[in-house]
């Protein structure tokens, strides 16, 4: 979760969601220029396209305070980079380029349509659009798509991307090592009956497979041009832009791909004549450059820093050029089901009631940092329904009476002792853990504070169940963004017992609830989105009944859009501006 | 002199081997003693929710499952003889001195550091010229005009320079001279070979900020040294011999006062060449300092090891040069 930073969806506040309900049913808008305005106002790019334009030319500069995990589209997991790679890598499917919840829809990109499922969601067939070419003019074939998927199996070379193909595909997927090591081998569960058809054979039903192939791991790679770990220096483009230059950890530049045809992927545009990405730029300086108009976009899309936030919110003119969408990410605490006395559900419920949610919200940046959360899934997940089991919304200061009642039921009427784990290099997590410690002490729960660094949090600390048990880490800070806006894409890694592993664990609560496990299985076997939504909501409710997660906030990010930037809109899935359609005047 | 240099170079090699052993032990042995598993370490370098086989592949690729002494031997031998690394479709040869293969970027460490050295060298050497010129000049004048307004003002400014951190002066200078009055807009490193004028223009603010910190220190040191030296008997003798005051000050006074300053300068320059971390981060200059920060944030041990070795090398070499210069500044050393 940390490694992926903000992986996610953008959602909107309640009012915005109501407005957008109509948009959601509007089909896959291939144009992002409808319904927009040009006069700046706060949140203008959340529910509509701000400053729509088809003007070509100019340069867009992105600054990144760090660097993407890789520019190789088959080797990335960061939301901002998934967003950006659409400019040069065309996967089988992608997310609709339209404002509002409509942006959560998965739509065809390289494929002519969404996947055709058969054999009870076990076989997925995609037909490629005709005429699509690489930047060097070579036609794209289904073999290039298959090869792109195959190379992601070599985790020693491409270590960063998701592992869904390895875990979902049938045949020899479990033992396949990828084309670099297995020169004569073949991933048997992906077949190419003709140059424009690719078929995926899964070992179990998986109704969300269209979302899985939306990862750019399915963007075609020509085998002859694949240089393995060095492919990131110049990925061969199928999108509107191609690499002109690349300096590792410093800068890369994209220019228009002359081969590209807008009909290949209507979700992206070819507007600026150059796109420059500066890497490892000092974060406060990025905000200054953004406000000065020296750059156009803060690449990670996770919002401006505290100093710039204060400056923007205190200036009406600057505020009018900003947006504060719910970005699909959530901050919360895992409540471990194995560490006594939290192995008793009533003890966990006592923590749920006693926590002061207002103070947690303050720790995470106040109302502009996030909305108080009451569910285990954010509002951006398809099938989400709001509920408030532990009075987070009705009594945000904490329900002390209910907490004491639960303490009595768990056999510790005067409270108990446990520990809160958090990442010491995350100021907001430090503040929220201190606030939680204070709130719990009001009902007699004495919580010690135990920290590690972000780098070791999952590999050696909170993500190692034996360490968690031996050090009595009952309450553990976490954050999460979904791999796709569905119940499985959000919650499988957090709540399914099959996701518990000995190191790098993400089901840190160690939930083992057969109901939840079965619903995850049923969700992927379901034949309709409506059925999947039902299971999603049931899982959310059951997880909260199990009290394995203490939700803190549905995260928000304050984004700034410099004047001159065109077609600005927040993509609900990525949780930031849609990089695929931006232009400049 | 040649024997002296050879002897120092041999000692340098041994010192660097010891540094490499200590740093290698810190990063690869101590975590193991603290209970960290190589599997847990490998999970840091693979995407989230990895399969077990994915983690094992990473563990093998990074050589984490080898015994520590084997890992160390591979590390040392790569520095001397180079190494081939598996980059998937092709093998990447990392020529000596090869400081390993980055866990994160999957690229050899040495070429990355080499590309960053010009940035740090430009920053450090340019700032060094400024702080030496300003610091020594101000220190000498302050010493000669002890108690005057100039002395008090310059020492006050020096105190401020020592006290103000670069992340403060840097951000203030950027705010004022890059954004409010864009005299130096879009500060970023431009190679001197590409555009010498832009190279200098973009480094003016970092140079001044870095030099402000060091010049303050050097001014105070020079002043103290000069005050002490100018009260020595041989200065009185020189004056009594009728030497011009300029000669007394520069040849007899300053020359003696420079010896301790030279020692500190060697250390300071060596440290800065290993990475002016705060200045580079503040001004987003992609030198060894920023490289170090990225390596630490990514827990990229080969990169951290590489930069530690390079920094140690710079410090040792800078000190050796200072030792040689001693004999020029102070003839007594030759005897």
Image (cartoon, coloured by chain):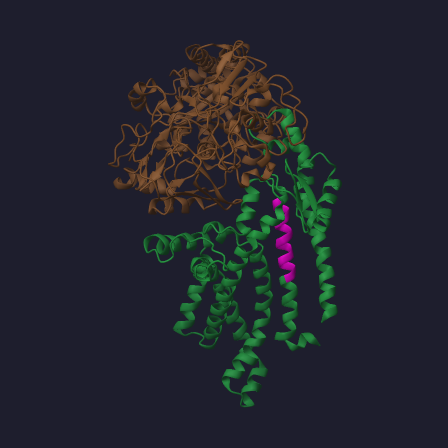
Chain colours: A brown, B green
Q: Does residue B313 show up magenta in the picture?
A: yes
Residue in the image at 47% along x and 55% along y? B190
In the rendering, at what x and y percent does residue A291 appear? Answer: 34, 45
Which sits in the foreground, A221 or A331? A221
Span highlighted in magenta in the image: B303-317
Q: Is residue A314 left or right of residue A574?
A: left
Q: Does residue A241 show up magenta in the picture?
A: no
Which sits in the foreground, A550 or A141? A141
Q: Is B96 placed above or below A397 here? A: below
In the rendering, at what x and y percent does residue A111 appear? Answer: 46, 23
Can residue A443 be seen here? The reply is: no
In the rendering, at what x and y percent does residue A462 appear? Answer: 57, 28
Residue in the image at 36% along x and 32% along y? A366
Q: Does the magenta stretch mainly form a helix, a strand or a loop?
A: helix
Image quarter in which the C terminus of chain A is found: top left
Snapshot quadrant of residue A108: top left
Snapshot quadrant of residue B37: top right
Can residue B99 be seen here? The reply is: yes
């Amino acid at each position: 979760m940390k490694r992926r930073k903000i992986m996610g969806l953008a959602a909107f506040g309640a009012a915005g969601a109501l407005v957008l309900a109509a948009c959601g049913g509007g089909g896959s808008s291939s144009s992002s220029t409808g319904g927009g305005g040009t006069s700046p106002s706060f949140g203008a790019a959340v529910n509509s396209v701000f400053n729509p334009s088809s003007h070509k030319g100019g340069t867009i500069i992105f600054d990144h305070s760090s660097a993407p995990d890789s520019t190789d589209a088959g080797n990335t997991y960061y939301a901002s980079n998934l967003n950006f790679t659409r400019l040069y890598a065309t996967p089988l499917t992608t997310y609709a380029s339209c404002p509002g919840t409509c942006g959560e829809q998965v739509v065809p990109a390289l494929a002519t349509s969404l996947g055709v499922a058969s054999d009870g969601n076990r076989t997925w067939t995609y037909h490629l659009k005709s005429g699509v070419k690489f930047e060097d003019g070579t036609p794209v074939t289904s073999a290039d798509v298959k090869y792109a998927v195959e190379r992601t199996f070599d985790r020693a070379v491409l270590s960063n991307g998701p592992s869904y193909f390895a875990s979902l595909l049938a045949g020899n997927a479990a033992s396949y090592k990828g084309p670099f090591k297995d020169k004569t081998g073949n991933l048997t569960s992906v077949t190419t009956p003709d140059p424009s058809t690719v078929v995926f054979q899964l070992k179990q039903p998986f109704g969300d497979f269209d979302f899985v192939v939306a990862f750019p791991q399915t963007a075609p790679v020509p085998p002859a041009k694949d240089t393995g770990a060095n492919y990131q220096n110049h990925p061969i483009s199928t999108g509107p832009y191609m690499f002109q230059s690349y300096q590792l950890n410093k800068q890369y530049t994209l220019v228009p791909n002359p081969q590209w045809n807008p009909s290949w992927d209507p979700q992206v545009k070819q507007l600026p004549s150059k796109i420059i990405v500066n890497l490892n730029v000092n974060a406060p300086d990025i905000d200054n450059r953004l406000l000065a108009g020296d750059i156009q976009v803060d690449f990670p899309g996770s919002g401006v820093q505290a100093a710039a936030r204060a400056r923007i919110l205190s200036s009406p003119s600057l505020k009018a050029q900003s947006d504060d969408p719910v970005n699909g990410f959530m901050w919360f605490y895992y409540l471990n089901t194995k560490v006594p006395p939290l192995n008793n559900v009533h003890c966990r419920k006592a923590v749920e009631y006693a926590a002061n949610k207002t103070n947690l919200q303050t720790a995470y940046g106040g109302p502009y940092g996030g909305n108080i959360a009451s569910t285990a899934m954010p509002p951006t997940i398809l099938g989400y329904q709001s509920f408030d089991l532990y009075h987070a919304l009705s009594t945000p200061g904490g329900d002390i009476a209910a907490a004491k009642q639960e303490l009595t039921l768990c056999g510790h009427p005067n409270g108990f002792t446990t520990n809160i784990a958090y990442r010491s290099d995350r100021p907001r997590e430090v503040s929220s853990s201190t606030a939680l410690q204070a709130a719990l002490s009001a009902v007699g729960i004495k919580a010690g504070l135990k920290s590690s660094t972000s780098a070791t949090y999952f590999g050696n600390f909170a993500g190692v169940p034996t360490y968690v048990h031996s050090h009595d880490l009952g309450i553990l800070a976490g954050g999460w963004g979904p791999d796709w806006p569905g119940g499985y894409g959000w919650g499988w890694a957090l709540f399914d017992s099959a996701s518990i592993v000995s190191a790098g664990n993400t089901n840190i609560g160690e939930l083992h609830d057969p109901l939840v496990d079965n619903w995850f299985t049923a969700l992927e076997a379901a034949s309709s989105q409506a059925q999947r939504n039902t299971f999603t909501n049931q899982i959310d409710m059951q997880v909260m009944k199990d009290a394995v997660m203490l939700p803190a906030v549905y995260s928000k990010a304050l984004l700034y859009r410099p004047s001159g930037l065109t077609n600005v809109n927040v993509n609900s899935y990525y949780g930031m501006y849609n990089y695929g359609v931006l232009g400049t005047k | 002199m040649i024997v002296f240099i050879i002897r120092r170079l041999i000692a340098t090699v041994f010192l660097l081997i010891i540094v490499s052993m200590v740093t290698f032990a810190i990063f690869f042995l101590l975590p193991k003693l603290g209970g960290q598993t190589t599997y847990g370490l490998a999970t840091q370098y693979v995407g989230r929710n990895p399969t077990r086989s994915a983690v094992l592949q990473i563990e093998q690729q990074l050589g984490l499952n080898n015994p520590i002494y084997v890992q160390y031997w591979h590390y040392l031998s790569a520095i001397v003889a180079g190494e081939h690394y598996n980059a998937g479709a092709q093998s990447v040869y990392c020529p000596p001195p090869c400081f390993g293969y980055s866990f994160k970027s999957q690229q050899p460490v040495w070429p990355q550091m080499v590309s960053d050295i010009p940035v740090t060298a430009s920053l450090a050497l340019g700032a060094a010229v400024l702080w030496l010129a300003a610091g020594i000049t101000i220190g000498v004048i302050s010493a000669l005009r002890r108690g005057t307004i100039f002395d008090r003002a310059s020492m006050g400014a020096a105190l401020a320079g020592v006290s103000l951190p670069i992340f403060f002066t840097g951000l203030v200078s950027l705010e004022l001279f890059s954004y409010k009055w864009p005299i130096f807009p879009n500060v970023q490193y431009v190679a001197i070979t590409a555009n010498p004028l832009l190279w200098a223009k973009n480094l003016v603010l970092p140079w001044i900020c870095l030099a402000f910190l060091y010049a303050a220190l050097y001014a105070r040191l020079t002043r103290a040294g000069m005050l002490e030296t100018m009260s020595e008997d041989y200065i009185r003798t020189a004056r009594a011999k009728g030497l011009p005051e300029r000669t007394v000050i520069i040849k007899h006074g300053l020359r003696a006062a420079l010896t301790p300053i030279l020692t500190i300068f060697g250390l300071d320059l060596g440290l800065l060449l290993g990475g002016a971390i705060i200045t580079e981060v503040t001004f987003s200059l992609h030198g060894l300092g920023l490289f170090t920060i990225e390596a630490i944030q990514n827990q990229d041990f080969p990169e951290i090891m590489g930069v530690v070795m390079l920094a140690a090398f710079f410090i040792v070499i800078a000190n050796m040069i200072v030792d040689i210069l001693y004999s020029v500044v102070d003839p007594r050393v030759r005897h």
